[in-house]
Image (cartoon, grey):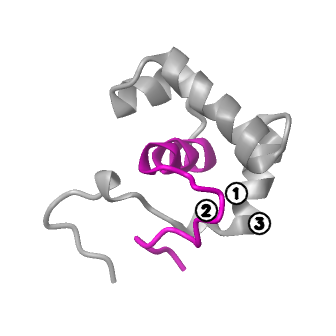
């Protein structure tokens, strides 16, 4: 079940990090592509991913981060910025 409410945030993950996690989990975008989508530089995306890897999730790769995020329920969360006005879900 998808939700617009993020999972319990015991890792102090920011909204911007949640948006990056969403792109990482649900697309095959590179850091450059994620940066363009979120109006961030690719270096900012890479830095935020490093913080997520090392400090918040304690993992060493994007595959491990994906596994961690799925285990914590972040794959069920859709950030508000990815909704368009007037879209209805049934």
Q: Where is residue 77 in the image (x, y as percent from the top left)?
A: 51, 65
**Cβ–Cβ below 8 Å for labels 1 and 2?**
yes
- Number of other residues with Cα within 10 Å of mark 1, as a class: few under 14, some 14 to 19, many 20 or more: some
Mark 1 and 3 residues: CB-CB less than 8 Å, in contact?
A: yes
Tell me the number on the disc at residue 59: none
Up/down of 4 relative to 84, above or below: below
Residue 5 position (above or below residue 13): below
- Does the segment drawn in magenta span residue 3? yes
The one of 23 and 45 positioned closer to us in this rendering: 45
In the figure, 52 relative to 32: above or below?
below
Which secondary structure, mark 1? helix
- Dot 1 or dot 2, earlier in sequence: 1
Residue at 64% x, 65% y is: 10
Q: Name the residue under label 3.
A: 71
Q: Which residue lies furthest to the left in this view?
A: 86
Residue interval drawn in magenta: 1-26
The question of residue 71 being in magenta is answered with no
Q: Distance between the residues labelled 1 and 3?
A: 5 Å
Relative image position of residue 79 (x, y in whole percent): 40, 57
Disc 2, SS: helix
Mark 2 Cα shell of 10 Å, populated few (<14), some (14-19), many (≥20): many
Q: Quadrant of the N terminus?
A: bottom right
Screen quadrant of the C terminus = bottom left
Residue underneath mark 2: 75
Residue designated by label 1: 69
In whole angstroms, how far apart are the C-alphas of marks 1 and 2?
6 Å
């Amino acid at each position: 079940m998808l939700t617009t409410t993020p999972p319990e945030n015991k890792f102090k993950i920011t909204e911007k990090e949640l948006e990056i996690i969403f792109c990482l989990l649900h697309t095959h975008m590179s850091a450059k592509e994620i940066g363009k989508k979120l109006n961030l530089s690719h270096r900012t995306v890479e830095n935020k991913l490093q913080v997520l890897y090392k400090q918040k999730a304690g993992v060493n790769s994007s595959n491990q981060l994906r596994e961690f995020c799925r285990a914590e329920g972040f794959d069920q969360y859709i950030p508000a910025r990815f909704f368009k006005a007037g879209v209805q879900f049934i």
